[in-house]
Amino acid sequence: MDIAASIKGYYDRRMFRIFLIGMMSGFPWVLIGSGLTLWLREDGLSRSAVGFASLIFSVYAINFMWAPLIDKIRIPFLTQRFGPRKAWILLFQLVIMLALLGWSMLDAATHLTLVIGLGLVIAIASASQDITLDALRIEQARADETDSIAAGAAVTVIGWWTGFKLGGLVMLLIADGFQAAGMTAYWQMSFLAMAVLMVMMNIALVFVPEAPRAAAASRSAVDGDRQAPRLARAINWLDDTVLGPLKAFFVNNGLKIGLAILAFVFLFKIGEAFMGKMSILFYRELGFSKSDIGLYSKGLGWVVTVSFTLVGGLVAMRFGTIKALFWAGVAMAGTNLMFTLLAWSGKSTGLFALAVVMDDLAAAFSNVIFVTFISLLVDRRYTATQFALLASIGTAGRTVFASSSGALVDGLGGNWGVFFIITAAMVIPSLVLLTRLGPKLAFKD
């Protein structure tokens, strides 16, 4: 396949829908990743406390547990009006907006427990909507459209980073503007502005069509027999919606390869997550303002992310997912070392911009390849559940373990340079595993 043929995949009109889906998935991370992190730090919490507060992200690591329910349950009125996928998304979006309204009326210093609690509500709603967003995104393309899946993965990552980067840029500029105007509740007002942006995205979501659902595994006669005992029907439903997807995954890949896949997915992005959790605090401690962080880390970072995500999609289509995934891991480790140089040299706008560009280049490349890898492993009979399972395992390392990132920095006496070296080394185990795993995977790369 030549470059021109590969690029055509991005001109498919379905890509715009996938872009919106990705953006809605990334946007909540602005709120609980960047917004809540800086809000708590500026209200006096330590790096360790802020890091452990990020444990609310751990719900992303277990959302596969309720994915079968979301995949099967229909919401009265909303499902009939908008479709089963969009009904759940709209419901969770409403929950997030109500939580933002709650944040707008609280002071973090005096209502810390409630602030964290509402952050957890946002995380649960966001992790839950991701189950349906991923399924809606995957189902925009047929299972045999390999190039469309790769292009869709690239556009998904672009959308995610647009929601996260540009959403973060808007939020930080608004917060800095309100603070400069002398408003003490500048974070609270910024969260209300974010709720307005969410309303606009939901209006666009209504126009995204839902593809016909893939046929699930055939159900037994007990499931269809309403006269059968409730326990028998419950056991059959559990097998169909929970155990079935898990069994299908290991049947398709084998037990040994299946476990190796799960181990790789868990390990691959731990180092990136350790760095990402603390990066915004690192920028502030170097002396950069919220506007500086917004313009360089979010604005400039978005441009780089979009550009190299498209490149990453082309690389996945032309050279194969496994090879691309290996070099993406090498790139992640290498760019983490750029922040060591920044930490040891002190505040430098030029070096800051270069580090951000290189880091976002590696992140964009690795994310699109990673999403492509997971998408190719999904059994279309269980789209939502299997993707949620794989994504959740990947998220576990990035949330539960990375929550100790602040404690690690404090344990190093605030030595950011050594911290970033450690994060670079964290990718090595996953790359060793990938070299052994690649030739044994079931899908054709």
Image: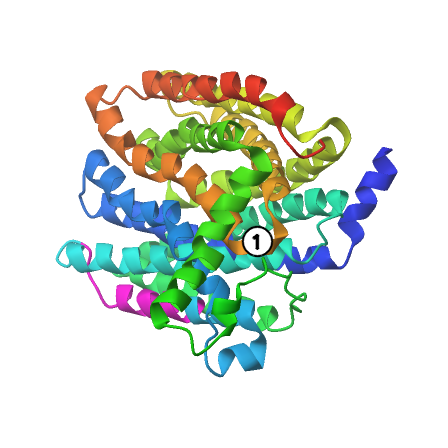
Q: Which of the pair 409/94 is nearer the observer?
A: 94
- The residue at the point 34 percent across, 64 percent down is 189
* Position of residue 435 measured from the top left corner of the image (x, y, whole percent): 57, 17
Q: Would you place residue 98 above or below residue 142 in this image? A: below
Q: Would you place residue 411 above or below residue 48 in this image? A: above
* Residue 102 among those drawn in magenta: yes
What is the quadrant of residue 409 in the picture? Answer: top left
* Position of residue 62 measured from the top left corner of the image (x, y, whole percent): 36, 48
Q: Which of the pair 397/170 is nearer the observer?
A: 397
- The residue at the point 38 percent across, 44 percent down is 61
Q: Which residue is mark 1?
A: 383
Q: Quick check: 92 left or right of 257?
A: left
Q: How many marks?
A: 1
**Magenta segment main secondary structure:** helix
Quadrant of the frame with the C terminus:
top right
Quadrant of the frame with the N terminus:
top right
* Position of residue 234 measured from the top left corner of the image (x, y, whole percent): 38, 65
